[in-house]
């Protein structure tokens, strides 16, 4: 039986039993209640790990209306079962889930019929470096993270919310991959609307065992008697799924327009994926059997049975496009404040991109997407022309080539 994930995360990954954000939530409970109670809330991408955690956090402050949108119909079903099975949460009578894309016409119909919302939080995004292997995947990534976000912002410009939050990533600070670069563009895009309504975002670490993550894959590999593979040279900060929703709640509700929130994590809290794999296997009663290749690991996995004590792993260096060996939450050119919260730092953006700059970027994207012979490099070129510190290097190999 696989060890309970929540307990494993607390003991071996984040190494903290209590959320690092609980103090700031307690210190600001009155303000949170004032801003959320009896308000109309829309959560986009609410079936994912972070979005569903945000839903659970905001329900603790009694919104009047909660609408959750996600393309994952099964995920919405599980979210509803989860929150209705939790006696610590009060689900409002006006609660609805919609399995749809926020880029679809039907979403805009629903939004307008509802008359807008007081709080809008967007978690819909391509979040993985795996999603940038060629020109088609990159175009899809840009459309979701940037183009669709602008459609939503234009709608909010008409139906102005009290709070708008769009989740970012630590990979937006000095981005080296296209996903991180797209989220940095997203940050600049949403901030350009700051004069119309309140806009905030958050950069934070990897969410331990989140949907689609490498650690979540360890569970699948064990359940299927397949070998575990992980890089040995990629260090990451981690927060728990619960903490991911809490930092977004704090940034969304308490943040001032133009602010980017991030967790105050220390370098000694970084951990490699290979170390997580080792601890996870040990916690499940296995000994580690190191293999020198993926082929050897696959062959040895064929011998796994109910009595097996040893588990085959293949650990290697990272050699795929877009992998950053370490994580950071802000750049040396950004203005950072560390004293306002116990667990959170704040990047303050004072100068926003002009509408002319945004319009030119979107025109450049449109032109390159419509050009039949355009390649991945052409799209990266458009991004480089907009992002000063975009340091993308093409290695010619992506994560689809690895276990």
Image (cartoon, rainbow, N blue to C red):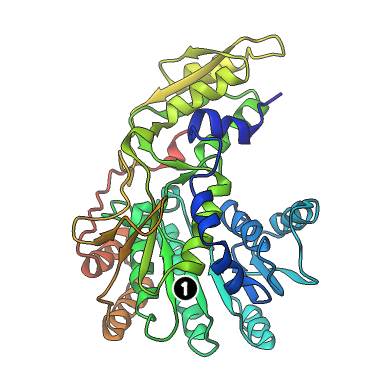
Q: Secondary structure at mark 1?
A: helix
| Horizontal and vertical percent position of residue 216 | 57, 37
Front residue of 258/387: it is 258
Please give the name of the residue rendered at 48% of the width and 16% of the height, measured from the top-left corner.
296
Regarding residue 270, the answer to whether it shows in the image is no
Front residue of 324/43: it is 43
Task: Tell me if residue 148 comes above or below residue 301 in the rendering.
Answer: below
| Horizontal and vertical percent position of residue 356 | 27, 85
Q: Which residue is mark 1?
A: 149
Q: How many marks?
A: 1
Regarding residue 335, the answer to whether it shows in the image is yes
Front residue of 10/74: it is 10
Please give the name of the residue rendered at 54% of the width and 69% of the height, measured from the top-left corner.
31
Dividing the picture into quadrants, the one containing residue 90 is bottom right
Dividing the picture into quadrants, the one containing residue 66 is bottom right
218 left or right of 340? Answer: right
Task: Tell me if residue 119 comes above or below residue 210 in the rendering.
Answer: below
Front residue of 129/94: it is 94
| Horizontal and vertical percent position of residue 379 | 31, 65
Dividing the picture into quadrants, the one containing residue 159 is bottom right
| Horizontal and vertical percent position of residue 198 | 44, 78
Task: Tell me if residue 202 comes above or below residue 5 in the rendering.
Answer: below
Q: Which quarter shows the N terminus?
A: top right
Q: Residues within 10 Å of mark 1 (few under 14, many from 20)?
A: many
277 left or right of 387? Answer: right
């Amino acid at each position: 039986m696989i060890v309970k994930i929540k307990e494993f995360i607390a003991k071996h990954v984040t190494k903290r039993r209590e959320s690092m954000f609980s103090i700031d939530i307690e210190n600001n409970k009155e303000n949170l209640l004032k801003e959320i109670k009896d308000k109309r809330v829309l959560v986009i991408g609410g079936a994912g790990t972070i979005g569903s955690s945000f839903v659970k956090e905001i329900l603790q402050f009694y919104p009047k209306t909660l609408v959750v949108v996600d393309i994952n119909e099964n995920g919405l079903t599980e979210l509803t079962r989860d929150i209705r099975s939790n006696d610590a949460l009060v689900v409002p009578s006006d609660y609805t889930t919609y399995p749809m894309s926020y880029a679809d016409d039907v979403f805009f119909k629903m939004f307008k019929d509802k008359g807008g919302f007081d709080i809008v939080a967007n978690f819909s995004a391509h979040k993985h470096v795996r999603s940038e292997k060629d020109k088609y995947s990159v175009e899809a990534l840009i459309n979701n993270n940037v183009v669709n976000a602008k459609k939503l912002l234009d709608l909010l410009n008409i139906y102005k919310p009290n709070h708008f939050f769009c989740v970012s990533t630590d990979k937006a600070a000095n981005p080296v991959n296209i996903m991180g670069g797209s989220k940095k563009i997203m940050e600049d895009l949403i901030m350009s609307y700051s004069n119309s309504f309140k806009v905030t975002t958050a950069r934070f670490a990897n969410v331990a065992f989140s949907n689609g993550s490498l650690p979540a894959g360890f569970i699948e590999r064990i359940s299927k008697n397949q070998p575990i593979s992980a890089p040995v040279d990629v260090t990451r900060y981690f927060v728990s799924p619960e903490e991911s929703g809490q930092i977004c709640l704090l940034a969304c509700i308490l943040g001032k327009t133009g602010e980017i929130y991030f967790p105050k994590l220390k370098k000694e809290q970084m951990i490699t994926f290979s170390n997580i794999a080792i601890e996870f296997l040990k916690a499940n009663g296995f000994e580690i059997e190191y293999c020198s290749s993926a082929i050897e690991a696959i062959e040895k996995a064929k011998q796994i049975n109910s009595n097996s004590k040893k588990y085959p792993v293949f650990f290697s260096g990272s050699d795929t496009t877009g992998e950053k060996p370490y994580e950071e939450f802000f750049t040396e050119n950004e203005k950072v404040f560390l004293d306002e919260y116990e667990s959170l730092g704040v990047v303050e953006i004072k100068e926003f991109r002009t509408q002319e700059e945004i319009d030119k970027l979107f025109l450049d994207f449109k032109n390159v997407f419509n050009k039949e012979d355009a390649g991945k490099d052409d799209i990266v070129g458009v991004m480089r022309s907009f992002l000063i510190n975009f340091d993308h290097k093409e290695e010619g190999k992506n994560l689809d080539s690895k276990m």
